[in-house]
Image (cartoon, rainbow, N blue to C red):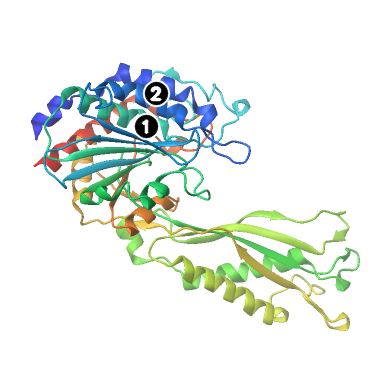
């Protein structure tokens, strides 16, 4: 086991930083926010290929098998395979996506679209999420190609398109799974490299985006008894809905096992109304927000419950708490009732990784060996693609070597030392799975 790690050695810092500089230089063109910004992941693919093709069967320079798979122009995925000697024995590194969230240069203290270095800090959009991982896994595969190390396991790296916008399908890993191009990866652990802080991330949350529309009656604010105030209706109805939600979906005992930072939550994040004077009670308003759901509850159950809450409130609107002596939601003399409706955008389910799998075991041992301790964690952030992979039968484990503190944030950076440890963790995983 030790021989494999010695042969793979440490991360070649100069090579890694040089590659990352080239990749971050493309970050402006791989921002994912359609329809304005549609990423061209092939810009990143070009740099990865420049590093790996000299060690590939394409050029006859090495053993790497490279497959560039595109479903849309300029939006490719890249599957790189280092063949092992034992059929069916495999491990894979997946999830290194080649698109990024947007960045406004006016908000940053440095140029987000070029790599800058400040001591250990490697700064730029994508350094933590996830172009830094693209460069890191590229260096691992390059080293395998250089050394031509004899392994029983086939090692596969899958660099993917379109992770930052799962509402658009048929571009990235979902299309690869549909086409059966990843089926062979079910033969061993699949490590999804797209989280942060060097520890195994063993659970993620589901997300249900919701919108509540409230209808009242517009009137002068000096005569509130003649109005149905949709803002007050919204506040009281949302309070009732949240109370019922937390009663029906309380903290789950498994959340402590998985180390979730929070239980399931349902909260507003946006409030809007059509506008009007300050002396005018509006006719309608909208409150939007999300449910973040730990993977021990069903997304469909929650959606059905939220609809049930709304229906019951509408049927008993006159029983809902009011705000003051003339606040009301029913005007019998006008045969008017306030009302609310709920709608949902695309929901996704969370995932709880298998804590008894071989993949989890080797990831924990490698992390403890390299970092000095292992403390798996879970968050109610979403990674919908890995739930799909688990449902398809893959042994999915997740990790990452950027910084959660700068994830999707302005002034994003990662630490070179963390990436070096990530490389050593990969080497340890490979070594353990050869035993």
Q: Is residue 225 left or right of residue 95?
A: right
Quick one: SS at disc 1?
helix
Measured in 3D between alpha carbons, the distance from the residue under mark 1 to the one under mark 2, in whole angstroms, is 10 Å
Residue position marked by numbered label 1 in the rendering:
134
Q: Is residue 283 above or below residue 183?
A: below
- Local packing at callout 2 (Cα closer than 10 Å; few below 14, some 14-19, many 20+) is some
Question: Which circle's residue, 1 or 2, is located before the other in the chain?
Answer: 2
Q: Is residue 356 left or right of residue 312?
A: left
Viewer-nearest of discs 1 and 2? 2
Would you identify the image quadrant in which residue 68 lies?
top left
Residue 56 screen position, x and y as percent: 25, 26
Q: Residue at x 64, y 67 (%)?
A: 342
Q: Residue at x 46, y 69 (%)?
A: 249
User: Which of 27/234 is in front?
Assistant: 27
Residue 196 screen position, x and y as percent: 37, 39
Contact flag, marks 1 and 2 (Cβ < 8 Å): no
Where residue 47 is drawn, which disc sits there?
2
Quick one: SS at disc 2?
helix
Would you identify the image quadrant in which residue 141 lies?
top left
Residue 345 screen position, x and y as percent: 58, 59
Looking at the figure, which quarter contains the C terminus? top left
Residue 215 screen position, x and y as percent: 76, 68
User: Which of 308/67 is in front?
Assistant: 67
Q: Residue at x 18, y 38 (%)?
A: 430
User: Which of 320/143 is in front?
Assistant: 143
Looking at the figure, which quarter contains the N terminus? top left
Q: Residue at x 13, y 25 (%)?
A: 7
Where residue 196 is drawn, which disc sits there?
none
Q: Is residue 292 left or right of residue 343?
A: left
Q: Is residue 194 above or below residue 337?
A: above
Q: Is residue 363 visible?
A: yes
């Amino acid at each position: 086991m030790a021989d494999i790690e010695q042969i793979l050695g440490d991360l070649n810092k100069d090579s890694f930083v040089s590659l990352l500089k080239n990749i971050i230089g493309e970050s402006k063109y791989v921002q994912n926010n359609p329809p304005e910004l549609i990423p061209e992941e092939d810009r990143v693919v070009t740099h990865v290929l420049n590093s790996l093709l000299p060690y590939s069967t394409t050029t006859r320079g090495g053993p790497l098998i490279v497959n560039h798979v595109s479903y849309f122009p300029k939006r490719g995925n890249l599957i790189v395979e280092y063949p092992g000697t034992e059929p069916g024995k495999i491990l894979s590194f997946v999830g290194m996506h080649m698109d990024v969230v947007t960045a406004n240069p006016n908000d940053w203290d440095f140029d987000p679209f070029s790599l800058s270095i400040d001591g250990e800090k490697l700064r730029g959009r994508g350094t933590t999420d996830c172009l830094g991982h693209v460069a890191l896994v590229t260096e691992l595969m390059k080293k395998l190609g250089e050394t031509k190390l004899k392994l029983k396991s086939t090692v596969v790296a899958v660099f993917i398109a379109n992770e930052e916008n799962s509402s658009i399908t048929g571009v990235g890993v979902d299309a690869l799974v549909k086409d059966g191009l990843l089926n062979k990866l079910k033969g061993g652990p699949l490590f999804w490299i797209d989280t942060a802080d060097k520890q195994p991330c063993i659970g993620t949350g589901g997300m249900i985006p919701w919108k509540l529309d409230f209808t009242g009656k517009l009137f002068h604010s000096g005569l509130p008894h003649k109005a149905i105030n949709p803002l007050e209706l919204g506040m009281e109805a949302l309070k009732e809905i949240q109370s019922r939600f937390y009663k029906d979906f309380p903290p789950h005992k498994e959340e402590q096992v998985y180390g979730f930072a929070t239980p399931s939550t349902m909260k507003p994040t946006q409030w809007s109304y059509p506008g009007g004077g300050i002396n005018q009670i509006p006719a309608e308003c909208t409150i939007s927000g999300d449910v973040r759901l730990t993977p021990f509850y069903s997304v469909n159950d929650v959606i059905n419950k939220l609809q049930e809450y709304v229906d019951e409130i509408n049927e008993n609107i006159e029983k809902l708490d009011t705000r003051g002596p003339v606040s009301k939601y029913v005007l019998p003399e006008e045969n008017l009732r306030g009302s609310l409706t709920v709608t949902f955008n695309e929901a996704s389910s969370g995932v709880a990784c298998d804590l008894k799998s071989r993949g989890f075991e080797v990831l924990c041992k490698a992390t403890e060996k390299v970092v000095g301790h292992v403390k798996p964690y879970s968050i109610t952030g979403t990674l919908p693609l890995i739930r799909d992979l688990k449902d398809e039968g893959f042994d999915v484990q997740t990790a990452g070597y950027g910084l959660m503190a700068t994830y999707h944030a302005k002034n994003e950076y990662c630490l070179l030392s963390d990436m070096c440890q990530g490389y050593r963790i990969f080497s340890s995983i490979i070594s353990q799975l050869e035993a």
